[in-house]
Every structure is written in C-alpha cells, then in structure tokens.
Image: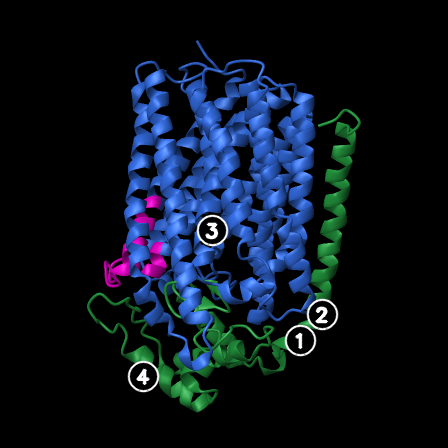
Chain colours: A blue, B green
Amino acid sequence: MSTLKYQSQSVATPYFVFALILFTGQIIFGLVMGLQYVVGDFLAGVIPFNVARMVHTNLLIVWLLFGFMGAAYFLVPEESETELYSPKLAILLFWVFAVAATLTVLGYLLVPYSRLAEITGNEYFPTMGREFLEQPTITKIGIVIVCLGFLFNIGMTMLRGRKTVINMVLITGLIGLAVFFLFSFYNPSNIALDKFYWWFVVHLWVEGVWELIMGAILAFILIKITGVDREIIEKWLYVIVAMALISGLLGTGHHFFWLATPEYWQWVGSVFSALEPLPFFAMVLYAFNMVNNRRREHPNKAATLWALGTAVMAFLGAGVWGFLHTLAPVNFYTHGTQITAAHAHMAFYGAYAMIVLTIISYAMPKLRGIGEASSKKAQVLEMWGFWLMTVAMVFITLFLTGAGVLQVWLQRLPEGGEALSFMETQDKLSIFYWAREATGLIFLIGLITYMCNFLVDRKAAK
Amino acid sequence: MSDTFTKGMARNIYYGGSVFFLLLFAGLAMHTTREMPKSDHRENLTEAVANGKAIWEDNNCIGCHTLLGEGAYYAPELGNVYYRRGGGDLDAFKGFMQSWMLIQPLGVPGRRQMPQFNLTEQQVNDLAEFLKFTAEIDVNSWPPNIEG
C-alpha cells in the first residue's frame, strides 16, 4: 500500500537521505573547527582550519540544495496534481550531484587546496578560493547543469498541471537560485569588483530567492497539516515573499558599506535591511495563526513543531540577529567579527536547515510507506532532536554573540594604540569558544537523537 | 487578513514590487560599478597584483583570514595588513612577508597554526603586491583602527 498521492514523489527520498548524511558531516567538521578555535594546533597538520571550514560551509550549502530539490520533487507533483515529468532524470541528476559533491569534498580533504586548483585547471578559468565559492570550476559547472536539469523537470511538471501560487513562488525562487549562481563565474582580477559581485550570489541567495523557496515549502506544509483554506495561505505567502524581495534586494546594500562603493549604500543598505526582519515576523504570525485556526488534527505533531520552529528561529536568527549589526554605524565596528558568525549560525539553522527538516519530517513517513505520520515513539525522539538541536543553536548563538561583543570592545572600539591585536583578543574570548564547543556537542547529541527517530519505524517502512 | 485585501492585490505587490526593486537594484549596481574606478585605484592593478590575487585564491587564504571584513574569523584581517606590518612601505612589507611566510607553521603548542604554503620568493612578493593594492582601495574609512 502506498501512502504517496503520486508515485513519482518517491524520487525525493534519496535527496532527503543524502541531505541528512551531509548535514551530519557538516556538524562533525563544525566541532573540529570549534575545537581549533581554542586548541589551535588540533589536527592542524591533517585538517587545517581553512579546510575544515570549507567542508563545513560547503556541506551546508550542498545539503540545503539537496533538501530544496527533494522538497520540490515531493511537493510539485502534489501541487500540480500530476506525476513528475521525468522521474528518471531526477534520479540521474541525483547521482551526478551526489558524486560531484562527494568528489569535491574528498578533493578538499585529500590534497592541498592549491593542488586541487592545479588539477582542476583553475588557472584557465579561475573561480576558486572565494568564500563559499571554493568549489573547483568544474564542480560549479556541474552544479549549473544539475540545476538546469532540475528546473527543466520541475518546470515541465508545473506546465503540465495545476499552477498554484506555491508552485509559482517556488519556481521563481529556484530560477533565481540558478540565475544568481552564474555570478560565481565572474572573478575579475580587481578585488574590489570581485567582492561587489560576489554578494550577488551570496546575499541574493540567502536573503533573497532562498526566502521564496522557504516561504513556498512552509506554505505547502501549513496547508497540509492545518487544513486551512488555500486562498488564505496563498495570500499570506504572496505578502511575505513580496516583503522579502522588496526589503532583501536593496538590503544587499548592507554588504556594500565598506567596499569600494559610493556612500549612499550606507543609507540604502541600512534602511532596507532594517525592513528585512518584517517578512520573518510575518511568517511567525502566519504560522501560528494557521496552526491555531486549523481545520484538522494532523497526526504528524513533529512536522507541526518544525514548521512553527523554523518560523520562530528564522525570525530570531535572520531577523533579530541580522538587525543587530545591520545599521551602518553599528556595522562599522562589528563587521567581520564573531557577531557575524553568531548571526550566520542561527539564521542558516533557523531559516534553511529547519525548513528542510520540516519538509523531511512531513514527507518521510509517506515516502517510507509508514503512513501520514511516524509512530508516537518515533515522533517523541524526533521532537527531542528538535529541542536539543534548537536550544543548542540558541546557546551557540548567544556565546558567539558574547565573544563578538567582547571582541568589538577590545579590538575595535579603542583608538589605534590601545586596541588589542586580533590574536590577543582571541585569547581573551576563549571561555566563550569553549562554551560554544560544549554546546556544539549538545547539538550533535540532538542530531543523533533526531537520526534515531528513523530507526523506530523501520519494520513498518517498506 | 481582511477581505478587501485580495489575493490578486497581494500577487501584484509581489510581482510588481519585485520587478521594480530588482530594476532599482540593478540601476544602483551599474552606477556603483561605474563609480568604482574612483575608489579602487585600478590604475595600480599590475600583473603582479593579479598574480597575487590568484595565489591568494589558490591557497584559500580566505578560509582563515578576513579581507576587508569578509572571510573566516579565525585569523587576522589582511585588508590593512600592508599598513599594520609594513607601515605603508612596500619594501618593508615584502621583507616582512618573506620572513613571515618562511617560518610557518610557528609550531607554538596550542597556538593557531598557519600552514606552510611553500611559495616561491616571487609568489610572496606578488602576494604582497596584492595586499598593498587591497589596502589602498578606498573602502569608506573601514576598519576603525589599525588592528583590523
């Protein structure tokens, strides 16, 4: 007996499974880096910090992409009310992407980065060595091919079927993701230009089009678990994603304060990025409103928890912690400190890791043939995982914020001669880093607990 | 939300607002790109600077350091290291860079370690030229002090 409305939705399974494997890798490398922050020479010869960080951030990006793709393969057929255009293509692209991602990470770990650049011919088309865009050019090309194939498959499915608002918002987000990634191929010798256009990938992804993807997935989940009228949810969705783009596009300006840019960006960036918390706040109101006005009692309580959790944590991490250092006069002192790291951790976890975990929570019991929801026991474990990871992330963020405030106080605020050097300052922050590492271990325990939930119903799964 | 605010209105705000602000953003970005030569001093972008940037990238320096505040927060800011370690003098800075790169890793127990990148003398000089170019870009008076 199948619990899927459309058989082709099942192609989402490998995407979700692989995403969770990469997520686990990300956390392990995060713990290695966290320890290197305080025990500087820990594994220094084997996994230098720059390698660990590259693996940590790249695994994050790639597992979120796998998650988004899995989400699209799962929800688009259901929204379109038709089978996926080509399940075979989806599976083929899964393997292409999974092999490319694995080889790239192995390349990071097994050879020095400069050797990887040499092997992959970076000198002929240099795109490597820029934060988050460290992938060899050939991997970047692979990502583009996978994205195009994916968009084609999803697009054809949508064209064939019902065109819902969720589908339209999702596809604009996904097209934006593919289009803005193309800026990663632009790497001029002029570092000033390079840095300016680098943000066209980084910011316009995470504070632009990814928010559309998040909004669409959340809307889908809310319709399913609350049974609230689609019309109401879709209206909210439009308003939220409109606010996200209206604030987020010019909000890019908050990255242009301290580059070779005209000073008007300090006004534009401050004003518009101060509006960036609004869509996230609206998302909190909307998620709670829909759940409170629910027309049905969905048995998947864990998915409901993730849906509410992602709205709240995205608002705190992206909205509040973003606003904390987004105004130009504040950012002058906080730019590139642990405050940035604090914000990045909670924002990525709250908005993007959690939305992927939300759809996984909703979809997995169906994909595994268990039914509408996992057993009570599995859900309890999953919810323990939710709370352990989420509370751990709140504390990681608080400790990094503490480190950041002290760093600004010691290194940035004093006049030239009295300011502590970077390395002296780092020594003073070690208590915060130790606390962050300990909390990171709690996060790992939460992740293990979360993973165990999949073992509970293994007999019921087919 | 009230009934007078329809889904159609919400949709129009989404599409209309997005297109409007996307165009506005593109316009400002074009203006900035045109203005940039005034502040980035690209007339000083020599072959050595371009090589230095390639060396910077090929060794993933951004994986530990920040450059103009962007990158990893594990090792010092290098956007102004030309002034901090070279006092704004290219020969002095190259001298510093040659000896500094040579003695890595420092091997102090427990201290954060910079790997040995085995760069040639020429490569270190080019890297120094790149860091000088970066330091001389006018970035609206950031960072607040010499410590970066």
Q: SS of the residue at dot 4?
A: helix
Query: Which residue type carries mark 1?
Result: Pro
Task: Name the one closer to the observer, A172 or A309.
Answer: A309
Q: Are marks 4 and 1 in contact (CB under 8 Å)?
A: no
The alpha-carbon separation of the residues under discs 4 and 2 comes to 39 Å
Task: Name the one closer to the observer, A361 or B103.
Answer: A361
Q: SS of the residue at dot 3?
A: helix
- B140 vs A409, left or right, is right
Q: Residues within 10 Å of mark 4 (few under 14, many from 20)?
A: few
What residue is rendered at 61% in x and 71% in y?
Answer: A260
The alpha-carbon separation of the residues under discs 3 and 2 comes to 31 Å
- A424 vs A351, left or right, is left
Q: Residues within 10 Å of mark 2 (few under 14, many from 20)?
A: few
| Label 1: chain letter | B
Q: Are marks 3 and 2 in contact (CB under 8 Å)?
A: no
| Label 4: chain letter | B
Q: Are marks 1 and 2 in contact (CB under 8 Å)?
A: yes
Query: Which residue type carries mark 3?
Result: Ala
In this rendering, the label closer to the viewer, 1 or 3: 3
| Label 3: chain letter | A
Quadrant including the C terminus of chain A: top left
Q: Mark 1 and mark 3, same subunit?
A: no
Residue occupied by mark 4: B99
Residue occupied by mark 2: B34
What residue is rendered at 58% in x and 14% in y?
Answer: A295
Percent x, y of residue B71: 46, 62
- Is A45 included in the stretch rendered in magenta? yes
Q: SS of the residue at dot 1?
A: helix
Percent x, y of residue B110: 22, 65
Report the disc number at residue A344.
3
The alpha-carbon separation of the residues under discs 1 and 3 comes to 31 Å
